Amino acid sequence: QVQLQESGPGLVKSSETLSLTCTVSGGSVNSGSHYWGWLRQPPGKGLEWIGHIYYSGSTNYRPSLRSRVTISVDTSKNQVSLRLSAVTAADTAMYYCATWSVVVPGNPFDYWGQGILVAVSS
Amino acid sequence: DIQMTQSPSSLSASVGDRVTITCRASQSINNYLNWYQQKPGKAPNLLIQAASSLQSGVPPRFSGSGSGTDFTLTISSLQPEDFATYFCQQSSSSPYTFGQGTKLEIK
């Protein structure tokens, strides 16, 4: 059973860079069965896919965020990282690490971390 | 982007009721449609993948159907633990998008 745990600062200043880490247990980021990615949910709102990365390094980002987002993987630590630059109040959200299955029909997000709330302050 | 529209956005029902939530895609997504349940303060939990396949461990009172652009999630007999928010999500093409959610409340 894959388990995901997000970590990072809960408060980021406007215009600075948000950096989060997802530590994977019970599975390997080298697994070919999943992409490893990030989603977010502003308070009281719906879910938004940010992007994901395959163990090969191949990435796929949400077009509206592409200029500000970097997702990377550290195979030695079994971790996935998110960097989002030039943040504004609109980036305040619960951020989730999740796996995107390439083997399960429908390609769902099948494993999720508990989430980490990140607020952007002015 | 493919737009996912859920209806209703909220629903009041009683324990034992049968409820149906619909999700419509702005273009055909074949069966690349997944359903999630989210309880307050928790991460979403996958219920159904590929429109109609029940995720392991999910009670059989949950079912999904549809293909193309129109999909439904049905709960055959509501239980107290089913009161939550439900989201549909398409994985047909990037960016992968979600419906706005349906909040299921106790009547």
Image: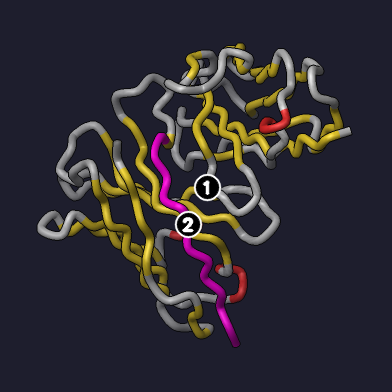
In the rendered image, the vertical position of residue A12 relative to residue A62, given as above or below: below
Q: Could you say whether the residue bearing mark 1 is in a helix, strand or loop?
A: loop
Bounds of the magenta segment: A110-122
Q: Residue at x 63, y 44 (%)?
A: B39
- Write down the chain letter for disc 2: A
Does residue B47 appear left or right of residue B40 in this picture?
A: left
Specify the amino acid type for callout 1: Ala
Q: Could you say whether the residue bearing mark 2 is in a helix, strand or loop?
A: loop
- Write down the chain letter for disc 1: B
Color scheme of the displayed model: secondary structure
Residue A49 falls inside the magenta stretch: no
- Residue B44 pos. (x, y %): 54, 42
Q: Residue at x 48, y 81 (%)?
A: A12
By secondary structure, the bulk of the magenta-drawn segment is best described as: strand
Q: Are marks 2 and 1 in contact (CB under 8 Å)?
A: yes
Asked if badges 2 and 1 are on one and the same chain, I answer no
Mark number for residue A43?
none
Q: Residue at x 23, y 57 (%)?
A: A79
In the rendered image, the vertical position of residue A24 relative to residue B87, given as above or below: below
Nearest the eye: A27 or B15 = B15
In the rendered image, the vertical position of residue A13 relative to residue B69, given as above or below: below
- Which residue is denoted by mark 1 in the rendering? B43
- Which residue is denoted by mark 2 in the rendering? A115
